[in-house]
Image: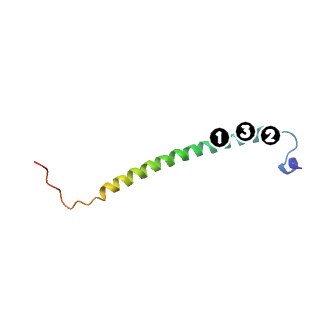
Amino acid sequence: MAKALLGYVGGSDPRLLAEMRRLQQRVQDLESELVRIQAENDALTAAASHESLLESIDVPQAEPALT
């Protein structure tokens, strides 16, 4: 019954298996790229928040240098 539902009788179609392997590899590639981009985004966010922390320090005028 399952074979009839899938539309073929007999063994697995090699083209279908090859396409499935190709798509699984593509999904793995995209998942690894997503992890890399998320890590890069986290690093950029941390750097931006550190920079904004330095900018939030309010110094109305320059202090005199020690002589």
Of the image marks 2 and 3, the number of the one nearer the N terminus: 2
Residue 27 shown left or right of residue 3 in the figure: left
In the depicted view, which residue is nearer to us: 9 or 54? 54
Disc 3 marks a residue whose amino acid type is Ala
The residue wearing badge 1 is 25
Q: Kindly report the distance in space between the C-alpha atoms of the residues bearing marks 1 and 2.
A: 19 Å
Q: Residue furthest front?
A: 66
Tag 3 residue: 18
Query: Which numbered disc, 1 or 3, marks the residue closer to the eye?
Result: 1
Look at 38% across and 53% down and name the residue there: 48
Q: Residue at x 89, y 50 (%)?
A: 1
Q: Residues within 10 Å of mark 2 (few under 14, many from 20)?
A: few
Relative image position of residue 39 (x, y in whole percent): 49, 46
Residue at the spot 44% in from the left edge and 48% down from the top edge: 43
Q: In terms of secondary structure, where does tag 1 sit? A: helix
Residue at image position (34%, 56%) is 52
Q: Residue furthest right?
A: 1
Q: Which residue in the protein does label 2 denote?
A: 13
